[in-house]
Amino acid sequence: MPDLEQKEVSPNPAAEPAPRPAEERYFMRFTREQRYLHAVLFTTFLGLAATGLPLRFSDSVWARAIAGSVGGFGAILFFHKLCAVVLTGAFLVHVKDVFTRGLLHRQKGIFWGPTSMVANWKDARDLFGHLRWFIGLGDRPKFERYAYWEKFDYWAVFWGMIVIGFSGYAMWFAPFFAHFLPGWALNAVLVIHSEEGLLAILFIFSIHFVNTHLRPDSFPMDMVIFTGVESEKEFKIKRPMEYQRLASQGLLDARLATAPPVWLVKFSRIVGFTAIFIGLTLLALTVSEYFV
């Protein structure tokens, strides 16, 4: 009888439910405002590229076909200017936000430190460390909140707004700028705007797309700029130093977020793949003008 009683009270392992796996945690990376600003940025850039290339290669068959589908080159120029104005407005909003947070509100980390977009010596070390890792001569660098190529992409927008933006507005409002610019300068801005625009298109649709979406740890698309959150696994792999810093400071839980809803993930994929398809198509058309 003691044996029977023992059997009755002892738990049956086969009858117990299997332990539920821990739910994957997500962390906030980009705020809603930052995601909206990026959406305006890439939408207007695609618009500028899709309208600027037909103007640049207006003798091409595909350029005339695009112009004919929207009402002529005059319509293309109108949409080009519209995208330029919207992009300029978004850029000025971002600059105002940066200086308001950094100078007026004295927020730490805007202009220097591990959370800043300003390059530092660690970025230089990461660059050379990455090159060594590519050829098998060292370990992969551990990145903080922003990698060196992300900072390069960020400041490239400032360069583009100054060089491409100024030259574009100089052509648009040529009578005004003619009051203080010589004639040769107005001719030069046409060349500068055209060549720098092509450089931006080639860079964004090749280097930026590859670095952001097509590298092994993000392929086929990095969803974080669309959803604003990333899984803990992604966080640890892509930005281990930031993860360790927040954990050591006890700030990791403050970045906890909910998993992105299914509809947002599906919508983001549609938007993202559409943008990549348009970008690669424009890249192919640009390259074809030089090699075909």
Image: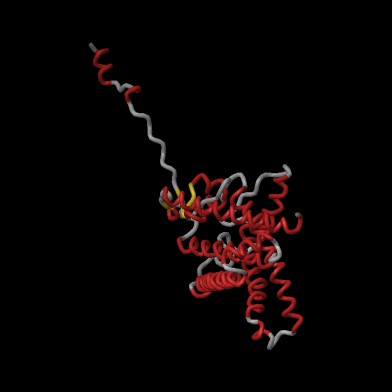
Q: Nearer the viewer, residue 4 or 43?
A: 43
State whether residue 18 appears in this view: yes
Please, is residue 18 above or below residue 262 in the view?
above
Q: Position of residue 160 (x, y in %)?
A: 65, 68
User: How many numbered marks appear?
Assistant: 0
Seen at 51% across and 73% down, the residue is 100
Answer with the quarter of the image where residue 186 lies.
Answer: bottom right
Indicate the quadrant containing the C terminus: top left, top right, bottom left or bottom right: bottom right
Please, is residue 42 above or below residue 102 in the view?
above
Q: Residue furthest bottom?
A: 179
Answer with the quarter of the image where residue 122 lies.
Answer: bottom right
Q: Nearer the viewer, residue 139 or 33?
A: 33
State whether residue 102 appears in this view: no
Give the colouring mode of the picture.
secondary structure
Indicate the quadrant containing the N terminus: top left, top right, bottom left or bottom right: top left
Please, is residue 104 above or below residue 291 in the view?
below
Q: Nearer the viewer, residue 74 or 269?
A: 74
Q: Position of residue 35 (x, y in %)?
A: 49, 60
Q: Position of residue 164 (x, y in %)?
A: 66, 71
Q: Position of residue 173 (x, y in %)?
A: 63, 81
Residue 68 in the figure: left or right of residue 25:
right
Seen at 52% across and 72% down, the residue is 93
